[in-house]
């Protein structure tokens, strides 16, 4: 017999688990932090970012957006990603794609 899973129920259970884990981390003085990086202005990405910020807030993760100009060079972009990666306060980096055509996704 097959079991049909409800996406809504699975998402809610996952949200509960994550909220509990983040709460436990916060009680230990550790605040999870997500940086969302967007290059240029992409209306389709903006709605996704808005949802990601809301979900992060709901589970207790601090999240913020770094908007980079579409004219950023590949070298500048890679340098910025390395800087974020070295920042001990940032635990995760979400790079919105697609990137402008002059930026190679292989380099990050």
Image: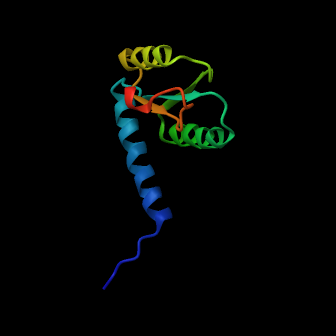
Instruction: Where is residue 56? Give x, y as percent.
Output: 51, 38
Vertical arrangement, residue 74 with respect to residue 60, above or below: above
Q: Give the residue drawn at x 55%, y 31%.
A: 101
Scheme by which the image is coloured: rainbow
Choose between 51 and 85: the one closer to the eye: 85
Q: Give the residue drawn at x 53%, y 33%.
A: 99
Choose between 40 and 7: the one closer to the eye: 40
Q: How many marks?
A: 0
9 lies left or right of 41: left
Vertical arrangement, residue 14 with respect to residue 60, above or below: below
**Does the image show residue 108?**
no
Q: Which image quadrant: the N terminus?
A: bottom left
Q: Give the residue drawn at x 39%, y 37%.
A: 22
List the single residue furthest toward the bottom: 1
Vertical arrangement, residue 71 with respect to residue 56, above or below: above
Q: Give the residue drawn at x 40%, y 45%.
A: 18
Instruction: Where is residue 27? Give x, y as percent.
Output: 37, 29
Would you identify the image quadrant in which residue 24 lies? top left
87 lies left or right of 55: left
Instruction: Where is residue 103? Give x, y as percent.
Output: 50, 26
Instruction: Where is residue 58? Give x, y as percent.
Output: 53, 42
List the single residue furthest toward the front: 102
Q: Which image quadrant: the C terminus?
A: top left
**Does the image show residue 4?**
yes
Vertical arrangement, residue 16 with respect to residue 90, above or below: below
């Amino acid at each position: 017999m097959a079991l049909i899973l409800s996406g809504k129920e699975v998402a809610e259970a996952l949200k509960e688990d994550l909220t509990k884990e983040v709460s436990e981390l916060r009680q230990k003085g550790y605040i999870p932090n997500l940086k969302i990086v967007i290059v240029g202005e992409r209306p389709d990405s903006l709605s996704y970012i808005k949802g990601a910020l809301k979900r992060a807030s709901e589970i207790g993760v601090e999240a913020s957006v770094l908007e980079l100009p579409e004219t950023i060079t590949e070298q500048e972009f890679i340098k910025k990603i390395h800087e974020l990666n070295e920042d001990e306060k940032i635990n995760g980096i979400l790079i919105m794609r697609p990137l402008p055509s002059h930026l190679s996704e292989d380099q990050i």
